[in-house]
Image (cartoon, rainbow, N blue to C red):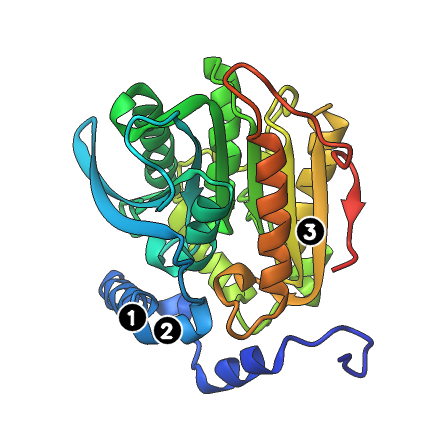
């Protein structure tokens, strides 16, 4: 369905949810109000009732929480494993996942897609319950959480993963963290097979709001520009080098893991994803861009109300299956790398 301007409208379910939701005054939110908001929002996202919207887990996977000991802190991760795996069998590929939200969010909100990947690839999927943005907790803390968990998993055989078949996968703020992990992996000599970036926020510099999609979708039903400005204020407080956490502004994007960039068209940060895919290809890194007209930001965590989420999940599953195939030391190449696909 199109509106009078010829722009695809969000699905009806999203419009109804948006009408029932009152957006906070982001510009005046205090630290105490943020803590209360985040706590309430995350309890809702982890509630069994929300699965009508966020999707029901794949029964072919087990799900449990684990603690990961990291330098100076312990961090919870949510682990998804295929029920077909048995002790003593060969190691499985690893997919490190980072949820979206920034100053809100929990790994539970991504149970639908992550359990499917664990069961269908099959693979061990580990979703990082990273530190959330808050006054005194900038984005660099969450970036370090993602990277430190990835290194821990690959160094400890108890996880039963094949270090030579590893991918990173993130959504929104998590897509930014996954992109930065791919850059760090190249710099440290770690070989990743793939990176999947879903509606990534890729630019936190002063140019973050200069893209056309920011104006066109400034007040989309699931993400608004005022919310993004609040997010940026927490992520890169005064004195922080915004370029260091802006993959789109990285000087060198060559030699990175092949990427799948998934962009919902009705999204203020849609152009972040589009431009990042372009920059990857310009740097010689294979990148496939897929777009979903009519889908809003965060759609992959809302399959109950956004039909396009299932098509995106199929694209992600197929891409990772191709990239993670084979045995240790082998890398497959896909014929679609470097193409743009906006048919969905």
Q: CA distance from mark 3 to mark 1?
A: 32 Å
Looking at this view, is 268 or 154 the one in front? Answer: 154
Question: Residue 326's quadrant in the figure?
Answer: top right
Residue at 32 percent across and 35 percent down: it is 86
Q: Residues within 10 Å of mark 3 (few under 14, many from 20)?
A: many
Looking at this view, is 89 or 251 the one in front? Answer: 89
Residue at 74 percent across and 31 percent down: it is 281
Kindly identify which residue carries mark 2: 50
Secondary element at image label 2 = helix
Kindly identify which residue carries mark 1: 47
* Residue 155 on image: x %, y %: 31, 19
The N terminus - image quarter: bottom right
The C terminus - image quarter: bottom right
Q: Residues within 10 Å of mark 2 (few under 14, many from 20)?
A: some
Secondary element at image label 3 = helix
* Residue 234 on image: x %, y %: 38, 51
Q: CA distance from mark 3 to mark 2?
A: 29 Å
Q: Residues within 10 Å of mark 1 (few under 14, many from 20)?
A: few
The answer to the question of whether label 2 and label 1 lie on touching residues, with beta carbons closer than 8 A, is yes
* Residue 172 on image: x %, y %: 51, 51
Kindly identify which residue carries mark 3: 271
Compared to 102, does 204 lie above or below?
A: above
Residue 24, can we see it? no
């Amino acid at each position: 369905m199109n509106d009078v301007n010829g722009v695809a409208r969000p699905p009806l379910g999203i419009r109804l949810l948006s009408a029932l939701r009152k957006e906070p005054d982001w510009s005046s939110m205090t630290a105490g109000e943020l803590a209360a908001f985040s706590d309430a929002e995350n309890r809702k996202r982890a509630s069994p009732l929300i699965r009508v919207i966020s999707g029901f887990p794949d029964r072919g996977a087990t799900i449990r929480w684990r603690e990961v000991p990291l330098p100076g802190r312990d961090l919870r991760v949510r682990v998804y494993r295929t029920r077909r795996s048995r002790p003593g069998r060969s190691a499985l590929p690893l997919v490190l996942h980072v949820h979206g939200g920034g100053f809100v969010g929990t790994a539970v909100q991504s149970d639908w897609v992550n359990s499917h990947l664990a069961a269908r690839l099959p693979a061990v999927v580990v979703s990082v319950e990273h530190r959330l943005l808050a006054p005194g907790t900038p984005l660099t803390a969450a970036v370090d959480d993602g990277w430190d968990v990835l290194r821990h998993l690959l160094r400890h055989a108890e996880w039963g993963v094949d270090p030579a078949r590893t991918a990173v996968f993130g959504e929104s703020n998590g897509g930014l963290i996954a992109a930065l992990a791919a850059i760090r992996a190249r710099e440290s000599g770690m070989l990743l097979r793939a990176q999947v970036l879903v509606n990534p926020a890729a630019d936190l510099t002063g140019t973050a709001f200069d893209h056309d999609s920011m104006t066109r979708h400034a007040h989309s039903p699931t993400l608004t520009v005022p919310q993004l400005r609040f997010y940026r204020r927490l992520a890169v407080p005064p004195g922080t080098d915004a370029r260091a956490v802006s993959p789109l502004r990285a000087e060198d994007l060559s030699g990175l893991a092949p990427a799948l960039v998934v962009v919902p068209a009705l999204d203020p940060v849609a152009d972040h994803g589009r431009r990042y895919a372009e920059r990857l290809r310009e740097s010689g890194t294979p990148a496939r861009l897929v777009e979903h007209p009519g889908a809003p930001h965060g759609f992959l965590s809302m399959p109950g109300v956004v039909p396009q989420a299932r098509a995106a999940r199929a694209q992600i599953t197929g891409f990772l299956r191709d990239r993670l195939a084979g045995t240790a030391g082998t890398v497959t190449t896909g014929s679609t790398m470097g193409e743009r696909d906006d048919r969905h």
